[in-house]
Amino acid sequence: MSSETPQAMTPVGVNHLVLNVRDIERAHQFWTEIMGFRQIGHLEQRNERSMNMRFYNGLSESHHDLALVEIPGGAPDEDEWSMAPRRPGLNHFAVHYPDRESWLKQIEFLQEKGVKFNLRINHGMTHSVYINDPDGHGIEVLYELPREHWQGDIQAALNYADVLPTEGAEALLDEPTPAFSGD
């Protein structure tokens, strides 16, 4: 064990932004036809609670730069944490770390500081922890898997979800995610 005082790892940037929208078709038209973004995938509807969500890029080499999620008719209870949107505005923004090691150090640091993990999940293109700042803004803390891991089938990678424990040592474990080659 090191004698150094634990400290936060410095992220390399904001990875993507997720916006809650009232009308996904209207928002899609604006972000593609007016702003020039390109839709690269969508969240597949698995059941009646699935979110209507679309993913876009156009700013970087990231898996996506922007996502739109439509506000459902029956929004979740205000006291219950959920990624499902409640009102228009920011759903969450994602902060990314340069590599797996710095990300693991950061999530360990967050846990040591008592930050609640709302969701710990391995997506097909990222490994992520969802938290809130003191004002309730959603933050996804992630590292992005190498591009060759997911670029062959971004749709499959966007829909992959391995939900993991949010507390204890199990929340700090990181196992490989299957590659999405598109073959």
Image (tube, rainbow, N blue to C red):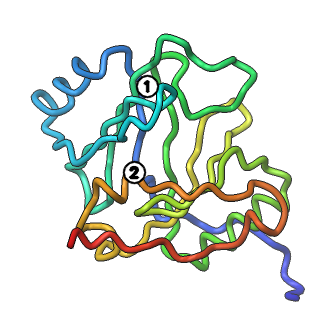
Residue lying at 62% horizontally and 48% vertically, measured from the top left: 130
Q: Position of residue 55 (x, y in %)?
A: 30, 43
| Residue hosting label 1 | 20
Q: Amino acid at mark 1?
A: Asn
In the image, residue 142 sits, relative to residue 20, either above or below, namely below
Q: Secondary structure at mark 2?
A: helix
- At mark 1, the secondary structure is strand
What is the number of the mark on residue 159?
Answer: 2
Q: Residue at x 85, y 75 (%)?
A: 5
Image x and y of residue 156, in percent: 33, 57
Q: Is residue 72 above or below residue 183?
A: above
Q: Is residue 111 left or right of residue 29?
A: right
- Amino acid under label 2? Asn
Left/right of residue 31 with respect to residue 109 in the rendered view: left
Task: Residue 19: name its quadrant.
Answer: top left
Q: Are marks 2 and 1 in contact (CB under 8 Å)?
A: no
Q: Nearer the viewer, residue 140 or 84?
A: 84
What residue is at 20 percent from the left and 73 percent from the top? 183
Furthest toward the top, the residue is 73
Judge by depth and name the residue closer to the eye, 96 or 119. 119
Residue 82 vs 179, above or below: the answer is: above
- Left or right, residue 116 beside residue 101: right
| Residue 44: numbered disc | none
Question: Residue most toward the left?
Answer: 33
First along the sequence among labels 2 and 1: 1
Of badges 2 and 1, nearer the viewer stands 2
What residue do we see at 21% from left, 31% from top? 31
Q: Residue furthest front?
A: 47
Residue count near mark 2 (Cα–Cα under 10 Å), binned few <14, some 14–19, many ≥20: some
Residue 105, x across and y down, in percent: 69, 73
CA distance for labels 2 and 1: 19 Å
